[in-house]
């Protein structure tokens, strides 16, 4: 998820039971031009693997080149974005636009699959307009071109995130292709995940928004016997997330980036609303940390344990790129 799936998010997801995590979408043009911030998306650590890195673009050759960079950086899968509904992306012919440009979509998947030896997967929406079934025509064509799995988020681009994902299309897709289909959209609980697996025949489910500030949703989906987190656990995970994000993005970028996460962690009835509002107004992350610890002093001990359990040392981090290109160093 763009603006969400930073490395700290992915590593956290893996700790809570996700079988596979995915990067934010990465611009193939940005990689092509050696844009520093874009290259920073290729920072991959061993403990987030298996990891998919998702690329978007509209030129088969540039996408193929980007896929090679992604493979070299250590990704286990290259995922191609045919779902992004945001104008900035669709007006360049990338993202969801490709759902209705089958010729070009097939050429992109073909070129990318040819360029790398890791599996290539595609993430799609149902089509551009409400009620569209474009994905069902396109899916088999992409498999023929070399896609090893398809993820379907069966909303239209026009819908953005409104309404509901129509997973009857997921079931139809499963019937039409002989590669694994991953169901994305509105997976928020173990019961919903199980129902989707049973009714669509999908090979796996993908969890998006439900995991934002809420890795416990993943644990619940994976494992029947789970308890909701304590206040101390919530604060400790948020503190770890803050520290890791600062390392990744640098303090300046992290300060703004993190604000949306406060509500995600502290909402859901866990803490009173004014607490979040107070945090977003604080100027420095040191103040945020101090305020969080004051709200749940026992979190310090939980945090210490979490940090001790994280992989330590250089060997655990796959960094084929010079450290200077990362925003956070
Ligand atoms: C903030 C945000 C950013 C997203 N960014 C991406 C993205 O970069 N690539 C992608 O394939 N899907 C992206 N998605 C879509 C999700 O992967 C997912 O398909 C969608 O949110 C439905 O699943 P959910 O109900 O579990 O959230 C994004 C969704 C959100 C909410």
Image (tube, helix red, strand yellow):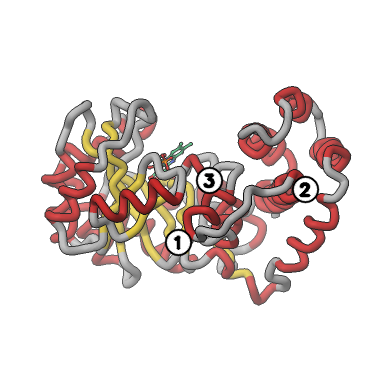
Residue 62 visible in image: no
Disc nearer the start of the sequence (1/3): 1
The earlier-in-sequence mark between 1 and 2 is 1
Q: Residue at x 45, y 55 (%)?
A: 22
Q: Earlier in the sequence, mark 2 or mark 3?
A: 3
Q: Is residue 117 above or below residue 257?
A: below
Look at the numbered disc 2 and give the secondary structure of its residue.
helix
Identify the residue shown where x is 78% and y is 25%: 278
10 Å crowding of disc 3: few (<14), some (14-19), many (20+): some
Q: Is residue 140 left or right of residue 66?
A: left
**Residue 75 picture location, percent across and down:** 45, 65
The reply, left or right, for residue 317 in relation to residue 282 is left
Q: Residues within 10 Å of mark 2 (few under 14, many from 20)?
A: many
**Mark 3 sits near ligand 1, with its Cβ under 8 Å away:** yes
Vertical relation: 325 (above or below) 211: below
Pick whichever, 169 or 280, lies toward us.
169
**Residues at marks 2 and 3, CA–CA distance in whole angstroms:** 18 Å
Q: Which residue is mark 3?
A: 211
Q: In the image as oriented, which residue stretches furthest toward the front?
A: 225
Give how far across and how far down residue 219 sits, in percent.
55, 56
Element class at badge 1: loop
Mark 1 and mark 3 residues within 8 Å of each other at the beta carbon = no
**Measured along the vertical axis of the image, is residue 145 above or below residue 192?**
below
The dot on residue 168 is none
The Cα atoms of the two marked residues, 1 and 2, are separated by 27 Å
Q: Which residue is mark 1?
A: 20
Residue closest to the far bottom: 315
Q: Which residue is mark 2?
A: 232
Q: Position of residue 232 (x, y in %)?
A: 77, 48
Q: Are marks 2 and 3 in contact (CB under 8 Å)?
A: no
- Where is residue 198, by image quadrant? bottom left
Q: From mark 1 to mark 3, how far is it between C-alphas?
A: 14 Å
């Amino acid at each position: 998820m763009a603006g969400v799936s930073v490395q700290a998010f992915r590593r956290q997801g893996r700790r809570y039971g996700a079988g596979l995590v995915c990067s934010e979408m990465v611009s193939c043009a940005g990689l092509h031009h050696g844009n520093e911030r874009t290259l920073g998306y290729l920072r991959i650590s061993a403990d987030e693997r298996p990891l998919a890195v998702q690329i978007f673009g509209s030129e088969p050759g540039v996408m193929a080149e980007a896929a090679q960079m992604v493979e070299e950086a250590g990704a286990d899968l290259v995922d191609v974005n045919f779902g992004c509904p945001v104008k900035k992306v669709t007006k360049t012919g990338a993202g969801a636009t490709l759902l209705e440009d089958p010729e070009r979509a097939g050429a992109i998947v073909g070129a990318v699959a040819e360029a790398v030896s890791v599996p290539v997967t595609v993430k799609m929406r149902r089509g551009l307009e409400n009620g569209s079934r474009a994905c069902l025509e396109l899916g088999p064509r992409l498999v023929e071109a070399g896609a090893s799995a398809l993820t379907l988020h069966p909303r239209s681009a026009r819908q953005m995130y409104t309404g509901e994902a129509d997973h009857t299309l997921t079931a139809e897709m499963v019937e039409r292709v002989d590669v694994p289909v991953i169901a994305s959209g509105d997976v928020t609980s173990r019961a919903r995940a199980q129902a989707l697996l049973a009714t669509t025949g999908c090979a796996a489910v993908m969890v998006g928004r439900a995991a934002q500030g809420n890795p416990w949703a993943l644990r619940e989906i994976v494992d029947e016997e789970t308890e909701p987190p304590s206040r101390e656990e919530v604060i400790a995970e948020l503190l770890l997330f803050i520290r890791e994000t600062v390392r990744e993005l640098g303090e300046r970028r992290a300060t703004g980036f993190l604000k949306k996460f406060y509500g995600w962690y502290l909402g859901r009835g866990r803490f009173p609303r004014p607490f979040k509002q107070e945090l977003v107004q604080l100027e420095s992350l040191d103040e945020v940390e101090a305020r969080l610890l004051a709200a749940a002093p026992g979190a310090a001990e939980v945090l210490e344990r979490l940090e001790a359990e994280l992989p330590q040392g250089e060997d655990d981090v796959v960094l084929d790129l010079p450290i200077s290109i990362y925003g956070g160093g």
